[in-house]
Image (cartoon, rainbow, N blue to C red):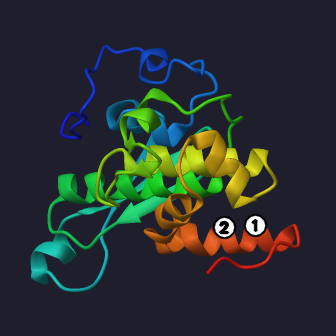
């Protein structure tokens, strides 16, 4: 899977990426894409839909299953297998961020701190760091019983910034409402 590009050097240990978590407790969504890809089983298959005969004759669809968690994601909308692999990996990171929990650190990670200015969180949903930040937010929220204000305080941002981070991804927004409802908390606005 050499065609998956990572902003991190291939030899960088995961403990350097997040010094507050050991490599054993680092959230999988925060792993460099190449490292995460090594933890996955990949299935290539054909899918129907637009793309003509090329799509019907070549196994361009990619399904990735994260072995440690069993969480899977797939992509088949591109004609290129490598593009579908990148898209499936991105979707897998987002699913891991919302569905898999690890213990929250006592303070925000270096990645989180690098994305904050004052009490503002600066991140686009399309950025490579978004799944890692989303996972960290979910981990902190779980640690405080899915309450926004205490989690935002630990993360060093405003409550509205935390809500904005969750709202950027529809799956995250739906998941947080479900989790809050299980503890009797009111829906977010």
SS label for mark 2: helix
Q: Residue 138 got which mark?
A: none
Seen as rendered, the residue at the extreme front is 118
Visible residue check, residue 70: no
From the viewer's perspective, tell me whether residue 175 is left or right of residue 9.
right
Residue 172 percent across, percent down from the top left: 55, 66
Residue 71 percent across, percent down from the top left: 58, 53
Q: Are marks 1 and 2 in contact (CB under 8 Å)?
A: yes
Q: Residue placed at 53% from the left, 71% from the top? A: 171
Q: Quadrant of the N terminus?
A: top left
Q: Residue 179 got which mark?
A: 1
Q: Residue placed at 81% from the left, 54% from the top? A: 145
From the viewer's perspective, tell me whether residue 94 is left or right of residue 3.
right
Q: Residue placed at 47% from the left, 46% from the top? A: 133
- Decide which of 30, 186 is in the foreground and name it: 186
Q: Residue 176 got which mark?
A: 2
Tell me the distance, in whole angstroms, between the alpha carbons under discs 1 and 2: 5 Å
Total labels: the figure holds: 2
**Residue 104: quadrant of the picture:** top right
Q: Quadrant of the C terminus?
A: bottom right
Mark 1 crowd level (few <14, some 14–19, many ≥20, 10 Å Cα)? some
Residue 167 percent across, percent down from the top left: 49, 71
**Residue 32: quadrant of the picture:** top left
From the viewer's perspective, tell me whether residue 139 is left or right of residue 89.
right
Seen as rendered, the residue at the extreme right is 184
């Amino acid at each position: 899977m050499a065609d998956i590009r990572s902003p991190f050097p291939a030899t960088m240990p995961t403990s350097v990426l997040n010094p507050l978590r050991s490599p054993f407790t680092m959230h999988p969504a925060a792993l460099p894409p190449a490292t995460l890809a090594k933890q996955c089983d990949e299935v290539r298959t054909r899918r129907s839909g637009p793309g003509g005969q090329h799509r019907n004759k070549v196994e361009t669809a990619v399904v990735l299953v994260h072995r440690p968690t069993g969480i899977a994601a797939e992509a088949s909308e591109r004609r290129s297998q490598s593009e579908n692999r990148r898209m499936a990996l991105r979707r897998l990171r987002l699913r891991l961020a919302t569905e898999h929990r690890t213990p929250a650190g006592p303070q925000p990670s270096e990645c989180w701190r690098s994305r904050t200015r004052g009490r503002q969180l600066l991140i686009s949903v399309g950025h490579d760091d978004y799944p890692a930040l989303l996972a960290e937010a979910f981990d902190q929220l779980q640690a405080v019983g899915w309450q926004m204000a205490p989690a935002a305080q630990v993360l060093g941002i405003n409550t509205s910034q935390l809500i904005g981070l969750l709202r950027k991804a529809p799956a995250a927004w739906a998941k947080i409402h479900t989790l809050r409802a299980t503890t009797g908390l009111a829906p977010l606005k």
